[in-house]
Amino acid sequence: MRTQELVQGAELSSLRTPTTVSVVMPCLNEAETIETCISKARSALKELEIPFEIVVADSGSTDGSEMLAEYMPQKKAMALH
């Protein structure tokens, strides 16, 4: 079934229910790029105007990636170890 058919077949009330989107970013020693990745993802998700979370799945980084992800301003991101 195509997306368009699914939307046409859905009740209007179900389309108004907020959806939460979870974005999971795998991370291993990405200190140079993690802030940019989170910022770009956050900007794109805000445009959708739906609840979201960004999860950074850190795999034992040794370059401070985890701290950068956890302490970003206006954080809507969390780091998992």
Image (cartoon, rainbow, N blue to C red):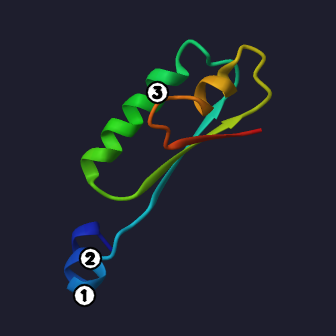
| Amino acid carrying mark 1 in the image | Glu
Kindly identify the residue that appears in the image at 31 percent across and 46 percent down: 46
Name the residue carrying label 1.
11
Question: Eyeballing the image, is 17 above or below 73?
Answer: below
Residue 2: % across, % down:
29, 69
For the residues carrying marks 1 and 3, which lies nearer the camera in this image? 3
Packing grade of label 3 (10 A; few <14, some 14-19, many >=20) is few
Rendered image: mark on residue 73: none
Name the residue carrying label 2.
15
Residue contact between numbered discs 2 and 1, judged by CB atoms under 8 Å:
yes
Quadrant position of the C terminus in the picture: top right
Residue 9: % across, % down:
24, 84
Residue 35: % across, % down:
50, 23
Name the residue carrying label 3.
37
Quarter assignment of residue 4: bottom left
Label 2 residue SS: helix
Packing grade of label 1 (10 A; few <14, some 14-19, many >=20) is few
Quadrant position of the N terminus in the picture: bottom left
Kindly identify the residue that appears in the image at 26 percent across and 76 percent down: 16
Looking at the image, residue 18 sits to the left or right of residue 61; the answer is left
Quarter assignment of residue 50: bottom left
**Earlier along the polypeptide chain: callout 1 or callout 3?**
1
C-alpha separation, residue under disc 2 versus residue under disc 1: 7 Å
Kindly identify the residue that appears in the image at 56 percent across and 12 percent down: 32
Label 1 residue SS: loop
C-alpha separation, residue under disc 2 versus residue under disc 3: 29 Å
Question: Eyeballing the image, is 33 above or below 66?
Answer: above
C-alpha separation, residue under disc 1 versus residue under disc 3: 35 Å
Q: Nearer the viewer, residue 26 or 7?
A: 26
Residue contact between numbered discs 1 and 3, judged by CB atoms under 8 Å:
no
| Amino acid carrying mark 3 in the image | Cys
